[in-house]
Image: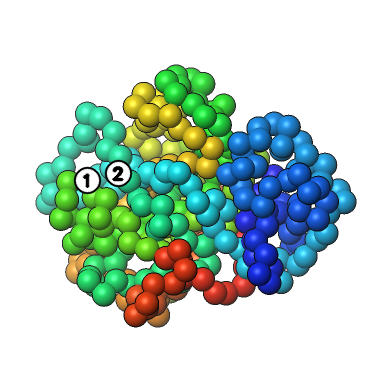
Amino acid sequence: MKLATFARGNEIAVGVVEGEEIVDLSTADSRLPRDLVTLLEGGPAMFEAALQATRRARRYPLTDVHLEAPVRTPRKFLGLGLSFKSHVAELRAKGIPIAIPPHQVWFNKQVTAVNGPYDPIHLPRSSSQLDYEGELAMVIGRRARHVDRTNAAAVIAGYVVCNDVSVRDWQLRSPTATLGKSFDTHGPIGPWLTTADEVGDPHHLRIRTWVDGELRQDGNTSDFIYSLGEMIEELSSVFTLEPGDILTTGCPAGVGALMDPPRFLTVGQSVRIEVEGLGYIENRVIDEPARPTQSGLAGGGVAKRA
């Protein structure tokens, strides 16, 4: 299934994307939640109820709704650094003597960075070093601790496209990278959660990023340094993974900061990121507003079809 969170008028609901339409699950079964985290917490029984509801629920054209971030309020939003061989190679090509670390390097993206798949991202008032990172992100489906890598697939609900938007000078201010990864609106995800059963092998997915139509990144998850199972094993050795947690898995070569000269994002530019089989997200850069928008999100716009 392709599970989406969408707004229609003043109502937020969870729906299933089928072709050019979205099925509003709440119109068929009042027991079904209006947020994806609660649906995930319901486990297989809730998924079965959602599947049954698609047969009798009201449908709307995708163009008549606004797609929100599939998971609007995750408990955790984590990113992995230096996870693609090609990204390590481009750092070395710039004369940066970086070695593949002996252990995975994870950082927090604050959950207020979560943004919709087609909503604007802010150029911060405090920096002009705004960069993109096209990534595959996992969404956790059930509580899990001490997961062996060979069993990790069982805890993944599905996958989303993510732009791990990065403010490079702020990223370098702290060894954790958290500050440069956590500005409001700097975590667009979507366009929906594609359940794991529809994805096939997530270790062989093409990832591409365009800026104003110019292809900047063109990689494949077959270039991962760590497998998804290794990522989940590492994290779950430390803390409990919970339904709706977002784990974004790093980016291939082609970031703006490592171009010669660097090519950071500017107001008016549009970043499109596509992951094979998952659709695309596309976000326009705007100046950070004088006043924060609700929940730190940019908002606005209508749904687009992947």
Residue type beneath disc 1:
Thr
Sequence-wise, the earlier of marks 1 and 2 is 2
Instruction: Please report the residue visible at 52 percent of the width from the left and 62 percent of the height from the top.
Output: 116
Name the element at disc 1: loop
**Would residue 65 be visible to someone looking at this image?**
no
Residue in the foreground of this view, choosing between 104 and 53 = 53
Quarter of the view holding residue 134: bottom left
Residue in the foreground of this view, choosing between 271 and 168 = 168
Image coordinates for residue 257, horizontal then vertical, percent = 24, 62
Mark carried by residue 176: 1
Residue in the foreground of this view, choosing between 113 and 291 = 291
Mark carried by residue 6: none
Query: Is the C-beta separation of discs 1 and 2 under 8 Å?
Result: yes
Image coordinates for residue 20, horizontal then vertical, percent = 74, 62
Mark 1 vs mark 2, CA separation in Å: 6 Å
Q: Residues within 10 Å of mark 2 (few under 14, many from 20)?
A: some
Q: Quadrant of the N terminus?
A: top right
Instruction: Please report the residue visible at 13 percent of the width from the left and 49 percent of the height from the top.
Output: 96
Q: Which residue of the protein is positioned furthest toward the right in this rendering?
A: 56
Q: Quadrant of the C terminus?
A: bottom right
Q: Is residue 82 left or right of residue 281?
A: left
Q: Which residue is mark 2?
A: 107
Image coordinates for residue 221, horizontal then vertical, percent = 44, 41
Image coordinates for residue 189, horizontal then vertical, percent = 49, 56
Quarter of the view holding residue 227: top left
Residue type beneath disc 2:
Phe
